Image: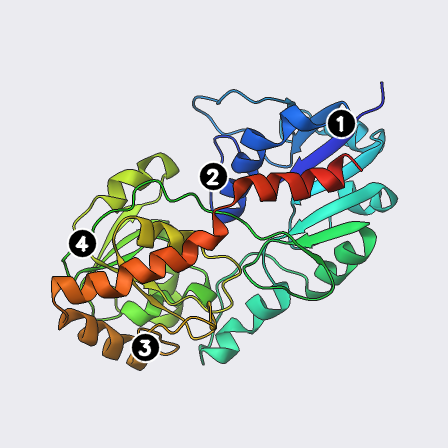
Amino acid sequence: MEYDVYYSTGGLNMIGGGADVWVNKWLEMIPQHLKTESKLLIHRTRPPGHQPDCPMEVHWQGHDRKKFKELMDNARRIHILHGYYSPHVFITENKDKIHSVGIHCSVEKNMKASFILNLDKSFHFNMTPDWEKQIIEYAKHPFWIGLSEWGNMKHIPNFYEFKHNKDVVDNNRVGFAARMETRKCPHFLEGIDSLFFTNNNDVKWWEKNLNTDTSKWKVYNYRHEQLDMFMKQDWGISHSAHIYEPFGYSIFQAVDWGKIPIISKDWIPEYDYPFRASTPKQFKEQYEKICELSLQEKRDILFPLREHLKQWDNKEQWRDRLLEIYNG
């Protein structure tokens, strides 16, 4: 029987970042509308623990590598929901079948982050700069999920549903709920009382390789199912000054939960927002300004920002634009 493959590097109960959240939203809204027999292939080893129901037939590469490759090789079309940032034989040997690919970050910009931030070393995923250009060329329908248009790709921005709409948390402790990638700029929080929700081993990398002072950080080791627990903690300022941020799911989350974000200068540049930082010095200055605000002044900052961000909550439009590709 003819079938299409939807390929991913995460999703279901394997959630390491925004791309995996995107895949799970895709699984909620897309499969029931597909017109061709479809299979989900996840290029990872299935993690232990409860496996949520999946609306598609699912195969994990680590469970049966041979069958995984056969399913790739015999597919009518291959749609890459989120792929690795370097080439793999499963993809390169089927390059003529790649119908679509979702691009979730700019590899070129990611790899420049340490230079822009004047850091000696860089913490990022395994990336091959030329691979991004190759996979975009292979795909008939490459699309970009970021807030703003980029390159000549279709622009299908991610979405975020505001479900909490919390009042401002009137507390001046800073929270960081993101991966410890260089472009996330965790070192901006040196010497600042902060709560971290991230991988504890990655924090140790910063301590060892860049001598980052983490003495004022309290680190909660990342487990996605504990996200709400962390967001309910008593912290009111979000370190959201991530450079080259494509969409910024964690920033939307912070705003939804009533946290005042400090953002980078290149994120939603069209919006007149007072608290932006691109260096540790700028971050500390903005942090100190927020600490001086009254509760009402914080509300006057956060609530208009939240309303501005709600333009990216149209999940039906997101679904329909993707289905135009998959059912075309």
Q: Position of residue 170 (x, y in %)?
A: 14, 57
Q: Residue furthest right?
A: 96
Q: Position of residue 126 (x, y in %)?
A: 60, 57
Callout 1 secondary element: helix
Q: Is residue 31 above or below residue 97?
A: above
Identify the secondary structure beneath mark 3.
Answer: helix
**Closer to us: mark 1 or mark 2?**
2
Q: Position of residue 64 (x, y in %)?
A: 68, 25
Q: Amino acid at mark 3?
A: Pro
Q: Is residue 117 above or below residue 65?
A: below
Q: Mark 2 or 3 closer to N-term?
A: 2
> Callout 1: few (<14), some (14-19), or many (20+) C-alpha neighbours within 10 Å?
few
**Residue 280 badge:** 3
Question: Disc 2 or 4, which lies upstream in sequence?
Answer: 2
Callout 2 touching callout 3 (CB < 8 Å): no
Q: Which residue is mark 1?
A: 66
User: Can residue 215 be seen at all in this image of the molecule?
Assistant: no
The answer to whether residue 142 of the structure is visible from this angle is: yes
Quadrant of the drawing holding the N terminus: top right
Residue at 51% from the left image edge and 68% from the top image edge: 244
Name the spot of residue 264 as percent of width and height, x first: 41, 71
Q: The C terminus is located in which quarter?
A: top right
Alpha carbon distance from label 2 to label 3: 29 Å
Give the residue number, with chain letter if any, for mark 4.
169
- What residue sits right under mark 2 in the picture? 15
- Dot 4: what SS? loop
Please name the residue shown 18% across and 63% down the image. 193
